[in-house]
Image: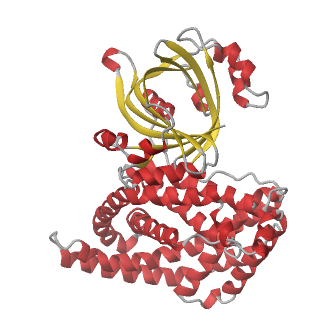
């Protein structure tokens, strides 16, 4: 399993990296400079790519090597992938050699055995890279290969050729603890502006060759085992959340994608919920908590304006429709501004340091240093009892808050919604430990309750934003008219929320949830 951390840097910052004192102090051999030419092959319909695999043949100083990578995860810039490598005589892959090297249980082995795949492999894109290599040894004895790659990815021929530049750092763990990768990265970041790299060169090449658009990344289902310890499950859950956060980084950085902002925010909220679930056993350092709050704020503002402009105002009809249309244009302008601010946040050194710090905390199991003997025993215990206790506690909290839902204030309804969301996240985290036939209806009824409470919460958020909107557009003409539109729509929304809060749908959703059977 290859474990590496990928970081991006501007080409003009490469000299600062080369001159960094850490590289000189920790280097165990002379710096190598290699000229590399990679040829990535796939079928015309990109079967390898569709199965999360990449096959390349690389020429380095006249010597040819083939590499197959498949599976794995990307969490906060940390890439973990299966890798098989071997010498070949020329620029064509040797599939027989790969077949012998790949484990029998690897899905990619069966894929490469299909005649339709083997016979159709062809070059898809190429890379031309100058690679500078430092072999590092940390004070703790960990061995890390630090690589600076600069060059280009190319696809197509002649008039249809396309290209993108490459300027990135890869830190690959050769021996030792993965936490040391983050120590080195954080040390470099103090002097060199770096960003997390979510996509490999292969992914970037495929995106170039096939013109794949950026897509928002939803949370992947967790596959837990009842034999896992509580600590192992926490690491799996937190890693899953960070994978969703980092998977949407590029979409948020593009500055316009509504769904990427939403999914990145969901990943962050799932992470915060997970930290709350395990707070009796481990604690995130206050400095990292503050950084999560900062990031959540940047994403939350963009998301709130998106919902107002694209959902709340868009749903209004009748006498409020004309007023809503007048407000929507101004709300969209605010949403675009907040998207730009969110993009600046996720491309900043501060975001990079936050994600590196979180991953370092996870990889090092840093919470154990502050744990009591009792907490350590509970962390090492099997997860099933912990999961059952957690779900029961979450359900009791939700039931208690929902008792007065019929006559609840907006603030009380908000507390019910938060409790429902935490209960749903916990159930989804632990879902694979219980029968699917029990989990699915329970989560379904929770989701229905959240939907009803969510609209009422959107109205509360809309009321706050509509009060801000005229002042936010102060440099444009028509501010007084905008204020009148906002006042009317605020009153309309309040009346509609009151009517819908008492029309029975929310209470029906609550009754259906109360009758649902807890999976645990």
Is 225 on the left-hand or right-hand side of 47? right
Decide if residue 327 is in sight here. Answer: yes
Q: Position of residue 350 (x, y in %)?
A: 40, 60
Left or right of 18 in this view: 80: right
Question: Horizontal placement of 358 versus 112: left or right?
Answer: left
Q: Residue at x 81, y 58 (%)?
A: 433
| 339 w.r.t. 484: above or below | above
Write down the quadrant of residue 500 in the picture: bottom right
Relative to the observer, which residue lies in front, 220 or 370? 370
Judging depth in this view, the residue of 508 and 372 nearest the camera is: 372
Residue farthest along the top direction in this orientation? 89
In this rendering, the answer to whether 174 lies above or below 279 is above
The answer to whether residue 197 of the structure is visible from this angle is no
Quadrant where the C terminus is found in the figure: bottom right
Going 60% across and 76% down the picture, which residue do you hit?
A: 417
Residue at 61%, 44% in the rendered image: 73
The image quarter containing residue 371 is bottom right
Label count reads: 0
Q: Quadrant of residue 504?
A: bottom right
Quadrant including the N terminus: top right
Residue 395 x %, y %: 74, 77
* Residue found at x 39% / y 51%: 253
Residue 235 appears at what percent x and percent y?
A: 68, 58
Rendered image coloring scheme: secondary structure
291 is higher (above) or lower (below) than 257 = below
């Amino acid at each position: 399993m290859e474990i590496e951390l990928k970081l991006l840097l501007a080409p003009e910052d490469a000299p600062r990296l080369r001159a960094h004192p850490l590289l000189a102090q920790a280097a165990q051999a002379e710096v190598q400079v290699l000229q590399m030419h990679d040829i990535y092959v796939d079928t015309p319909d990109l079967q390898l790519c569709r199965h999360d695999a990449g096959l390349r043949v690389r020429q380095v100083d006249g010597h040819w090597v083939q590499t197959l990578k498949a599976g794995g995860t990307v969490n906060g810039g940390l890439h973990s992938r299966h890798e098989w490598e071997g010498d070949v005589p020329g620029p064509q892959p040797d599939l027989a050699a790969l077949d012998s090297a790949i484990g029998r249980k690897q899905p990619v082995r069966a894929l490469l055995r299909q005649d339709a795949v083997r016979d159709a492999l062809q070059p898809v894109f190429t890379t031309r890279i100058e690679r500078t290599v430092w072999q590092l040894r940390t004070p703790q004895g960990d061995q890390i290969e630090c690589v600076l790659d600069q060059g280009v990815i190319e696809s197509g021929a002649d008039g249809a050729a396309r290209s993108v530049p490459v300027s990135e750092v890869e830190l690959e763990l050769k021996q030792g603890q993965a936490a040391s990768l983050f120590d080195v990265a954080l040390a470099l970041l103090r002097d060199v502006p770096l960003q997390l790299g979510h996509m490999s060169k292969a992914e970037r090449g495929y995106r170039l060759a096939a013109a794949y658009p950026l897509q928002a990344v939803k949370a992947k289902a967790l596959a837990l085992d009842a034999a896992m310890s509580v600590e192992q499950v926490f690491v799996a859950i937190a890693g899953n959340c960070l994978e969703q956060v980092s998977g949407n980084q590029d979409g948020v950085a593009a500055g316009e994608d509504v769904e990427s902002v939403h999914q990145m925010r969901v990943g962050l909220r799932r992470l915060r919920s997970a930290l709350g679930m395990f707070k009796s056993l481990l604690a995130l350092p206050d400095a990292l908590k503050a950084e999560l709050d900062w990031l959540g704020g940047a994403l939350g503002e963009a998301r709130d304006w998106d919902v107002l402009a694209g959902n709340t105002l868009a749903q209004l009809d009748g006498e409020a429709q004309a007023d809503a249309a007048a407000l929507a244009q101004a709300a969209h302008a605010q949403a675009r501004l907040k998207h730009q601010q969110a993009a600046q946040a996720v491309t900043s050194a501060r975001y990079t340091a936050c994600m590196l710090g979180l991953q370092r905390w996870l990889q090092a199991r840093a919470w154990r240093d502050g744990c009591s003997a009792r907490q350590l025993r509970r962390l090492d215990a099997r997860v099933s009892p912990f999961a059952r206790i957690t779900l029961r506690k979450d359900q009791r909290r939700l039931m208690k808050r929902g008792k007065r839902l019929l006559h609840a204030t907006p603030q009380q309804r908000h507390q019910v919604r938060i409790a429902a969301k935490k209960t749903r996240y916990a159930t989804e985290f632990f879902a694979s430990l219980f029968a699917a036939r029990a989990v699915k209806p329970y989560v379904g009824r929770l989701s229905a309750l959240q939907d009803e409470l969510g609209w009422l919460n959107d109205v509360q958020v809309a009321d706050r934003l509509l009060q801000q909107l005229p002042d936010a557009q102060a440099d444009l003409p028509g501010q007084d008219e905008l204020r009148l539109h906002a006042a009317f729509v605020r009153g309309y929304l309040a009346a509609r929320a009151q009517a819908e809060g008492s029309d029975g749908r929310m209470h029906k959703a609550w009754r259906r949830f109360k009758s649902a059977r807890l999976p645990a």
